[in-house]
């Protein structure tokens, strides 16, 4: 083909005739063109017609299947073979079937032969599916002898789909596998999270669950599929009604209906019409436009050899002419069928105009050929037909598929990398973790969160690990900035089901540390050392600290960039002994939470960046003497704190300081929960003698984990006669954790000690509160404004919460707990920056840890320490910051204030000690915090 016809073949996705195909002589000698003319003459009208109507017109969206009916008696077999050869040679990718209607007098046989060819794979085109036709054939073969609509419907569904049998046998393995998947998932969730065993168990559980869901979907499709397929037959194009009408319609053209009908010919004609409609509907659906595009490049062609106008061909012709696709029907004949309403087209030129304009779309077109044209076409296509080579096309398709697959894998890798930037790089060991008693202890510079993906701290752990990986890139870009690694030694896990333990404070510690890390690394070359953070977990209540310190010792020996750490553990004797094993010449420790008196005596490089228990005891004495002069103080704490093997230094040193200041007015009560057995060193639960009166004050001097049960015991015992209740700073976690506050008795009034200013987003966004203090000398940056800027990078306090709206994690500062670790990490980073490299007049030469300690101590440097968010920082000679602010705040209703997220705003400061900023106002006048007036019934 040449000219415009050749271009049409290319546009249709089919190659032009190759040598040896139609239009070329087998021996290489030029053959006459289709139609018998010379090689330079225009192509045969039938070839041009097939080229035009099979091409997919995407602009006009003419999605119409094509049926070509060829009749030319006598000798129509020659014409049928010629058209088939023409399609094989010139359009191998056009789905087509060549059927002799004389050999199939019935519609069923004719359509079966056509479907068998169009469904055949490896034919040069993509096989066409015929689901509707197959369903109609299955129903047509039925003998619906059963009585009742339900039984007949079941028989029809069983014919077109798998029977609904064997459900109990299929359900049992599904339930077993689902149980196994749930067990594996529970085992994985029970792990501390992040270990290879936990990851493998989780992946196995997900795989089993996917298998179970796949089996369930397959079983569901076995039940629902036949129903859906039966309803599909009621859609447009098949000729039956929807829903229940499908069954009623089907009963009129099944084998049983045809055999028992009074007029079998009429019943068979009814069935044949449905078969033709289903066949044409499948053709239409195979080439329908979808949202992902029409992937077929040409419409199908059905070539029928009909010598005498057989009934099967007439039925197919009539059914197609009656459908909405009638305009795409092309009849090639030398004698039009008398019953067909064709639009006659004498020549190819007469065909182009009405097709392009879409005129008379409801009538089929017929192209009449004379005997000479038929003979010419048969002669042109005689002999063997050579298919065009498809190696290049297959190679191109394979390359395209490979490129798409590689792009998909690359995109998946990028997404996975960005979502797993906290994970360790292959071949890099960034963790040393062991599982003890179901808890992961050790340290991590990268990897999975200690508390698992569902823990509150997981978000900040991942952010820290991702920033650690970014430090590697920043160090390559800024080689002048040395890396500095600081350890965050805390307790991030708790025993499963322990509702008394809170992780909010630890999560906020990580948030404050990450805010410093991000700000320091983003400051550029003038920002000091590049900061990495190693997260170390010592287990619940710091009981597994020995395992953690052992691994930190290995990290100190292997990584020279590790120079200090922030410690927020319980002040217990095992903790002190474990921390003493760390090399003091290389590791400087700062604690913003540990207040026991004897820590600095045991640990030579330990800086206590918080007022010790002696300052808290003095503040309590001053407050009690002001609001209840001469009253007795009863210190209540959990029995067992004196245990020599696990002595709680925080509780014991606080008891000793209170006893020293109150003298004979001091009394202790070693409390136990109701129902616990008595014993030596155990005074038992609360008694009525500890209730009411103005001559005594109850002071809870234990751990916050016992405060909830203690308050319920107090409310149940005193029944409304609750004395003035003061609690130590450990209980300030109830202000930070709403779940803890919700577990306390409603209406409970309490005076709480706190070692830092209570922060909320509402207070921090107040410029008068946040910006009234001056920062380090020469910077002009207020520490609270700097904290507000850095914490906003974590989407915290980006804007004030709306009135009446409950604050969430991003709009609440949990009482300001993040500020404590923020201060400590910034202070260590600042000290390392000032001490490395040594500068004249700032620090003496020696190991970096010693120079950092000297900078923190302030003995050899002229620049003052950075101011803290809570209050200014200044260490005494014994490395204790006694000037740090300590306050007592009154909460008239602990539960209501904390649960609503406004505890930091509603708390009233009733006493203060230490240095405060001028923006915090003058020292308050101590006032009482009355208990609730209404009596409360026992639980």
Image (cartoon, helix red, strand yellow):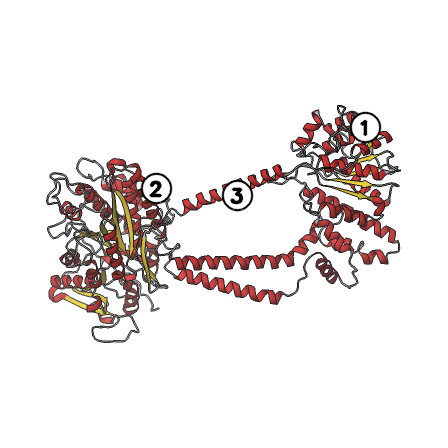
Image quadrant occupied by the N terminus: top right
Q: Nearer the viewer, residue 902 or 545?
A: 545
Q: What is the quadrant of the C terminus in the image? A: bottom left
Q: Are marks 3 and 2 in contact (CB under 8 Å)?
A: no
- Mark 3 or mark 1, which is nearer the start of the sequence? 1
Question: Measuring 47% from the left and 45% from the top, which residue is drawn there?
Answer: 412
Q: Position of residue 295 (x, y in %)?
A: 63, 39
Tell me, yes or no, if residue 692 can be seen here: no
Mark 2 and mark 1: span between their CA atoms? 83 Å
User: At numbered mark 1, what does the secondary structure look like: helix, strand or loop?
Assistant: loop
Q: Earlier in the sequence, mark 2 or mark 1?
A: 1
Sequence-wise first label, 3 or 2: 3
Q: Is residue 209 left or right of residue 550?
A: right
Q: Select label 1 or label 3 by which is in front.
A: 1
Q: Nearer the viewer, mark 2 or mark 1?
A: 1
Give the CA distance from mark 1 to mark 3: 49 Å
Give the quarter of the image for residue 647. bottom left
Mark pair 3, 2: CA separation: 42 Å
Task: State the count of labels.
Answer: 3
- Looking at the rendering, which quadrant does residue 393 occupy? top right
- 77 left or right of 646? right
Question: What is the quadrant of residue 570 in the picture?
Answer: bottom left
Looking at the picture, does residue 239 appear above or below residue 67? below
Name the secondary structure under disc 2. loop
Q: Which mark is residue 36?
A: 1
Q: Which residue is mark 2?
A: 798
Q: Secondary structure at mark 3?
A: helix
Please name the residue shown 48% across and 57% down the image: 206
Q: Which residue is mark 3?
A: 405
Give whichever of 446, 73 is nearer the camera. 73
């Amino acid at each position: 083909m040449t000219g415009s016809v050749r271009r049409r073949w290319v546009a249709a996705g089919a190659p032009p005739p190759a040598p040896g195909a139609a239009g070329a002589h087998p021996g290489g000698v030029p053959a006459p063109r289709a139609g018998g003319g010379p090689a330079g003459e225009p192509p045969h009208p039938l070839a041009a017609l097939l080229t035009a109507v099979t091409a997919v017109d995407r602009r006009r969206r003419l999605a119409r299947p094509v049926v070509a009916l060829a009749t030319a008696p006598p000798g129509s077999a020659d014409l049928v073979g010629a058209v088939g050869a023409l399609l094989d040679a010139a359009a191998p990718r056009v789905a087509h079937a060549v059927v002799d209607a004389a050999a199939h007098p019935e519609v069923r046989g004719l359509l079966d032969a056509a479907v068998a060819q169009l469904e055949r794979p490896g034919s040069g085109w993509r096989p066409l599916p015929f689901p509707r036709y197959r369903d109609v054939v299955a129903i047509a073969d039925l003998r619906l002898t059963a009585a009742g609509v339900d039984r007949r419907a079941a028989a029809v569904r069983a014919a077109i789909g798998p029977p609904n049998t064997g459900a109990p046998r299929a359900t049992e393995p599904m339930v077993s596998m689902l149980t196994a998947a749930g067990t594996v998932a529970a085992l994985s969730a029970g792990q501390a999270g992040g270990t290879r065993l936990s990851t493998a168990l989780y992946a196995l559980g997900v795989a089993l669950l996917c298998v179970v869901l796949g089996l369930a979907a397959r079983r569901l499709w076995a039940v629902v599929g036949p129903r859906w397929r039966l309803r599909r037959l009621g859609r447009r194009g098949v000729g039956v009604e929807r829903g229940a009408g499908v069954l009623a319609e089907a009963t009129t053209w099944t084998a049983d209906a045809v055999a028992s009908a009074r007029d079998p010919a009429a019943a068979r004609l009814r069935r044949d019409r449905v078969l033709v409609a289903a066949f044409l509907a499948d053709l239409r659906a195979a080439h329908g436009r979808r949202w992902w595009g029409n992937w077929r490049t040409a419409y199908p062609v059905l070539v029928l050899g009909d010598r005498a106008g057989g009934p099967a061909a007439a039925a197919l012709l009539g059914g197609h002419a009656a459908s909405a696709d009638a305009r795409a029907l092309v009849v090639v004949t030398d004698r039009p069928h008398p019953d067909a309403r064709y639009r006659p087209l004498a020549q190819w030129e007469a065909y182009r105009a009405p097709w392009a304009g879409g005129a008379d779309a409801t009538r089929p077109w017929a192209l009449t050929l004379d005997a000479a044209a038929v003979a010419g076409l048969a002669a042109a296509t005689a002999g063997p037909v050579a298919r065009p080579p498809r190696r290049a096309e297959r190679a191109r398709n394979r390359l395209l598929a490979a490129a798409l697959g590689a792009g998909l894998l690359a995109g998946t890798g990028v997404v996975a990398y960005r979502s797993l930037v906290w994970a360790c790089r292959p071949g890099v060991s960034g963790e040393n973790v062991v599982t003890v008693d179901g808890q992961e202890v050790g340290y991590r510079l990268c990897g999975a969160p200690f508390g698992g993906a569902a823990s509150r701290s997981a978000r900040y752990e991942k952010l820290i690990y991702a920033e650690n990986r970014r430090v590697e890139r920043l160090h390559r870009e800024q080689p002048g900035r040395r890396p500095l690694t600081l350890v965050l030694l805390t307790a991030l896990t708790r025993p499963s089901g322990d509702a008394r333990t809170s992780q909010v404070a630890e999560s906020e510690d990580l948030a404050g540390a990450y805010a410093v890390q991000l700000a320091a690394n983003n400051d550029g070359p003038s920002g000091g050392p590049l900061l990495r953070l190693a997260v170390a977990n010592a287990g619940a209540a710091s009981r597994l600290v020995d395992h953690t310190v052992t691994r930190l010792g290995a990290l100190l020996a292997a990584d020279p960039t590790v120079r200090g750490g922030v410690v927020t553990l319980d002040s217990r004797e095992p903790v002190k002994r474990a921390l003493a094993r760390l090399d003091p010449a290389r590791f400087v420790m700062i604690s913003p939470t540990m207040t026991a008196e004897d820590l600095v005596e045991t640990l030579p490089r330990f800086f206590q960046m918080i007022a010790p228990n002696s300052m808290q005891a003095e503040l309590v004495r001053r407050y009690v003497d002001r609001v209840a002069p001469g009253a007795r103080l009863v210190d209540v704490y959990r029995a067992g704190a004196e245990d020599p093997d696990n002595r709680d230094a925080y509780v014991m040193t606080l008891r000793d300081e209170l006893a020293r200041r109150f003298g004979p007015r001091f009394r202790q009560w070693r409390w136990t929960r109701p129902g616990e057995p008595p014993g030596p060193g155990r005074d038992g639960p609360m008694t009525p003698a500890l209730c009411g009166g103005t001559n005594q004050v109850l002071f809870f001097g234990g751990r916050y984990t016992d405060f909830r049960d203690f308050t319920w015991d107090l409310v149940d015992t005193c029944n409304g006669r609750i004395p003035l209740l003061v609690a130590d700073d450990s209980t300030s976690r109830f202000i930070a954790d709403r779940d803890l506050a919700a577990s306390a008795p409603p209406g409970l009034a309490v005076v709480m000690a706190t070692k830092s200013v209570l922060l909320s987003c509402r207070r921090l966004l107040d410029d008068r509160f946040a910006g009234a203090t001056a920062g380090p000398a020469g910077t002009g940056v207020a520490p609270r404004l700097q904290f507000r800027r850095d914490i906003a990078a974590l989407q915290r306090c980006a804007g004030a919460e709306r009135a009446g709206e409950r604050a969430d994690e991003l709009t609440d500062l949990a009482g300001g707990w993040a500020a404590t670790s923020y201060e400590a990490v910034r202070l260590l980073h600042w000290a390392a920056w000032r001490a490395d490299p040594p500068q004249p007049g700032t620090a003496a030469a020696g190991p970096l840890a010693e120079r950092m300690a000297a900078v923190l101590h302030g003995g050899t440097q002229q620049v003052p320490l950075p101011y803290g968010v809570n209050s200014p920082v200044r260490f005494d000679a014994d490395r204790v910051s006694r000037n740090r602010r300590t306050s007592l705040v009154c909460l008239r209703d602990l539960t209501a204030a904390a649960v609503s997220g406004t505890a930091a705003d509603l708390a009233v400061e009733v006493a203060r000690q230490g240095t405060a900023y001028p923006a915090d106002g003058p020292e308050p006048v101590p006032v009482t915090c009355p208990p609730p007036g209404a009596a409360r019934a026992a639980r």
